[in-house]
Amino acid sequence: MRFLVMNGVNLASTGKRERGVYGTESLEEIEAELKAFAEVHGHEADFFRSDIEGELCAKLAQADGKYDGVVLNAGAYTHYSYALRDAIAGISTPVVEVHMSNVHAREEFRRKSVLTEVCRGEVLGFGKNSYKLALESFWL
Ligand code: DQA
């Protein structure tokens, strides 16, 4: 199977920002590990990241039909982007929502996701392993 792992706003700063929350590894390092993880299980993973909401929406539309699944950490857009929600609802490729942190143990505004209802499922709270668990959900 072929997967697309997407990271949204501020995720490119992983490893530099709020290390106590998101860890010390860079997004490059995490992506390399996820690529190897997919390959070891006989799958392929591509990656896309953008801080720009419209670019994420456009990529989701492009990904439709080209991938078996999308793993999406939309960052703070998770909590208020109806545009991303509509983009996910508008494609038939399943999307799994991911968060590295346990958003339910943090600020009140992070408890609400406008994306979950249109996603196949959600994995959160396991650091970089949230991405691995989300990928695994497609082949388990
Ligand atoms: C995040 C959680 C969001 O609330 C936050 O805005 C992020 C990262 C996570 O991976 O835990 O940027 O999606």
Image (tube, rainbow, N blue to C red):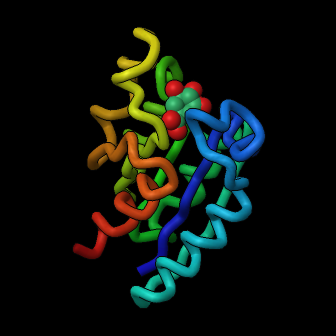
Residue under the point 37% across and 58% down:
134
In the figure, 64 relative to 140: above or below? above
Q: Nearer the viewer, residue 59 or 113?
A: 113
Taking the image in four quarters, ligand 1 sits in the one at top right
Residue under the point 41% across and 81% down:
1
Residue under the point 32% across and 37% down:
118
x and y percent of residue 114 in the render? 39, 24
Residue under the point 45% across and 84% down:
43
Name the quarter where the C terminus is drawn.
Answer: bottom left
In the figure, 62 relative to 79: above or below? below
Which quadrant would residue 125 be assigned to in this image?
top left
Q: Nearer the viewer, residue 64 or 137?
A: 137
In the figure, 53 relative to 5: above or below? above
In screen coordinates, is 27 left or right of 82?
right
x and y percent of residue 137 in the render? 28, 64
x and y percent of residue 9 in the render? 68, 34
> Does residue 31 show up?
yes
In the figure, 5 relative to 21: above or below? below
Which quadrant would residue 33 be assigned to in this image?
bottom right
x and y percent of residue 94 in the render? 35, 56
Which quadrant would residue 106 be assigned to in this image?
top left
In screen coordinates, is 140 left or right of 112?
left
